[in-house]
Amino acid sequence: MPQINFKRVPTSERDPKERARNFEEVNLGYTAEQAIEEAKRCLQCKNRPCVAGCPVEVYIPEFIKLISEGDFKGAIAKNKEKNNLPGICGRVCPQESQCEAKCTLGVKGDPVSIGKLERFVADQEIKDGVKAPEAPVKNGLKVAVVGAGPSSLTCAADLARMGYEVTIFEALHKPGGVLSYGIPPFRLPRNIIETEVNYVKNLGVQIKMDVLIGKSTTIKELFDGGYKAVFIGSGAGLPSFLNIPGENSNGVFSANEYLTRVNLMKAYKFPNFDTPVWLGKRVAVVGCGNVAMDSVRTALRLGAEKAMIVYRRTSNEMTARVEEYHHAQEEGVEFNWLTNPLEILADEKGRVTGMKCVKMRLCEPDASGRCRPEPIPGSEFTVELDTVIIALGTSPNPLIAQTTPELKTAKHGNLIVDDKYQTTMPGVFGGGDAVTGSATVIQAMGAGKIAARSIDEYIKAK
Amino acid sequence: MFTILEKRDLADKICEYVFEAPLVAKKARPGQFVILRLDEEGERIPITLADTDPKTGRIKIVVQAIGTTTNRLHCFEKGGAIADIIGPLGTPTHLDGFKKAVCVGGGVGIACIHPIAKELKAMGVQVTSIIGSRCKDLVFFEDEMRAASHELIVTTDDGSYGRKGLVTGPLAELLQGADKADVVFSVGPVIMMREVAKATKPYEVKTYVSLNPIMVDGTGMCGACRVSVGGVTKFGCVDGPDFDGHQVDFDLLMKRLAMFKEMEQQSLGLWQKEGCKCHK
Ligand SMILES: Cc1cc2nc3c(=O)[nH]c(=O)nc-3n(C[C@H](O)[C@H](O)[C@H](O)COP(=O)(O)OP(=O)(O)OC[C@H]3O[C@@H](n4cnc5c(N)ncnc54)[C@H](O)[C@@H]3O)c2cc1C
Ligand SMILES: Cc1cc2nc3c(=O)[nH]c(=O)nc-3n(C[C@H](O)[C@H](O)[C@H](O)COP(=O)(O)OP(=O)(O)OC[C@H]3O[C@@H](n4cnc5c(N)ncnc54)[C@H](O)[C@@H]3O)c2cc1C
Ligand code: SF4
Ligand code: FES
């Protein structure tokens, strides 16, 4: 029996001071030697607990074994049998609460660094030149997919593999959904998204940009046009605001707007790119999830002298990944816990000058077990600011449901689906954030995968 | 890519473009707009559909050069192509249930009021249109607007053509008497729309204005286009662009339109220095 190694091989990261001023990727990933060393830690458990923690059931021990043997080509091929977007997942998935949380080694030490290993094989393949997949034999049946986010890309790729002629319709001018407009390049470099989207295209999937379903054309018209089934992966793009006075002042942005300007429109390269972005010196981001972390770290990179999180609960309740929270701390982000905004203040030109807040305290857990924050009377104070970014979460865009009366939605506009991901309209399936509200990349991909199987069953049964 | 099939100079810095965009042409209703992007470096900007033909799949837009994107577009010639056109976006103008309408267009807004007047006339509504420009050289679409209306009044601020003064002059006259108009549609500079709304208020004539907030995606995803109507925040790109002129917070709209002024000037300055790289 080889010695069990409980310590994880660390990856190197760019220096926090230097990286907080540019958009280069923060984590540098493994070298080949490091990857092999880390892969050798895997116990190759027979019961494969890690796989049960993965929403797309990646062959985890199998691909890790191939890495440990130095067979990187074999490893990426094995990984891609289940996951079409490994370079993306390896970077953005919350492995610490999924596969790695279930890893046997985690009981006594560090779980295997499954995410970093997945990223390694994907990057290695890009270095070696990605092999285009063999285009599957077409069966002549057309399926339409709405949106080009991870849910749709997964569904489309799986359907293409089964032989379907798949067309994706995307409203924006670039595919990727949140991956392209939301997650910044310092966490997910753009060439990774491009490579993985190209992989899907090479399976024969067509992507049509600049088509807004519900406006440019409708679900019903897609069926009239010969599509046998439709998958809706339109995400949860509608931003929430605080609904407090002063929120329409110049310098107040939804995280979606702020991040879209920077990531999709490349405003960080202004004026070489035409789209501007507000360059705040004192920036507050309201909320404490991944979106808030991305926004506040982006603000630093755009030159903020002070970048802070304002959150009405504490670090125990925040929804951001621990890794992102640590990165933000290292880069100098200030955290204001138990603080709730009351009003945004502005000058006569309508530009933000500050924010009035109140301190909160967590009361005793209620029947549901959650501590509700409540304001502490008399604790109001004002913080001087020139920028406020609202990162309070998003809900599904109502556009498609509004223009397709057959589609029933639940509270917050989430599409109602059955256990096969079929919506209330026959032949129309849905998955990802459009169904769950904002969740994760891998959950969206998992839904896309199951929906692809259901669509196949549905069409075959007709 | 979207190819420019026709290009025509209409007035100083105002050009008309015809593109082939079948999906947009098939679905477009008066009051809707597109978002376009010139190329990889380009910004997404909203432009109203001035005319559409579902049969040929063609759309027409009229653009006034004021900043980087609009000036850059004017460097494109017939046969050139731009990266993206998406639409039709926005909620179509509410046209049902009126007998007598006044359509007021100012500046480049004349192109935007055109499909509204045209459709109203086709629906059997009595249409009087007022189009206003700063001076004679900026008047355009006179023939198009005459054809789309039963009566057309042209005004120029300096009196170099048509009636001297602002559009609100003739408008006030049309709001009086027993057979006064029952609705006013207005598209143009924010100040003009504010004045139109002020002029119609005492007569309690329903007044629609078409707001032009800064937009990014145009699909309801970012909230850049926030406007305040009757004290409630709305998204201009999906809830509008048309709103009840008597409820709009025009002051807020003007402030928000100036949000990126300095950067826009920097960008335009750079473009002017580098000159026009012609796209054929
Ligand atoms: C800033 C940010 C950071 C995040 N970080 C992480 C992270 O680190 N890890 C993680 O796992 N998750 C993260 N998430 C969440 C994750 O990105 C989403 O859960 C995931 O992208 C959802 O995928 P989707 O395919 O359902 O939808 P989206 O990715 O939202 O894609 C939907 C696509 O559909 C298009 N669309 C919408 N309506 C229409 C229409 N009517 N017609 C045509 N196209 C339409 C949209 O333009 C979009 O491109 C983050 C989210 C954000 C916003
Ligand atoms: C619904 C709608 C319909 C419009 N229709 C027309 C039309 O038919 N013809 C026409 O010539 N113009 C139209 N506009 C205005 C046009 O979008 C702006 O003139 C254009 O965006 C200016 O871009 P620029 O880069 O040339 O100038 P910039 O120098 O970037 O901006 C000049 C000014 O235009 C406004 N503006 C800037 N960026 C945007 C943006 N992304 N979205 C909206 N406004 C912006 C700001 O007030 C800014 O100060 C419309 C605007 C809206 C919202
Ligand atoms: S649970 Fe951990 S140790 Fe076991 S097979 Fe999976 S990755 Fe390897
Ligand atoms: S332009 Fe983004 S929501 Fe209206």
Image (cartoon, coloured by chain):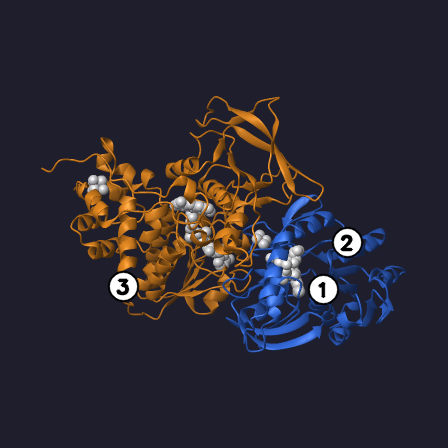
Chain colours: A orange, B blue
Q: What element carries label 2?
A: helix
Q: Mark 1 lies on which chain?
A: B
Query: Which residue is painted at 20% across and 56% down in the image?
Result: A74
Q: In this view, does A159 lie above or below A431?
A: below
Query: Which residue is painted at 32% across and 42% down in the image?
Result: A95
Left or right: where A61 falls relative to B65: left
- For the residue pair A436 and B16, the one nearer the viewer reads as B16
Residue labelled 3 has its Cβ within 8 Å of some atom of ligand 1: no
The answer to whether mark 1 and mark 2 are in CB contact below 8 A is: no
Query: Which residue is painted at 67% across and 63% down in the image?
Result: B66
- For the residue pair A327 and A46, the one nearer the viewer reads as A327
Dot 1 corresponds to which residue? Answer: B109
Amino acid type for the residue under numbered disc 2 = Arg
User: Mark 1 vs mark 2: same chain?
Assistant: yes
Give the CA separation, mark 2 to mark 3.
60 Å
Which mark's residue is nearer the viewer, 1 or 3?
3
Give the quadrant of the C terminus of chain B.
Answer: bottom right
Residue labelled 2 has its Cβ within 8 Å of some atom of ligand 2: no
Give the CA separation, mark 1 to mark 2.
14 Å
Q: Is residue B275 above or below residue A258?
A: below
Q: Is residue A420 above or below residue B46?
A: above
Question: Which quadrant would residue A96 be assigned to in this image?
Answer: top left
Q: What element carries label 1?
A: helix
Around disc 2, counting alpha carbons within 10 Å, would you say few (fewer than 14), some (14 to 19), or many (20 or more)? some
Dot 2 corresponds to which residue? Answer: B194
Residue B132 percent coordinates (x, y): 79, 66
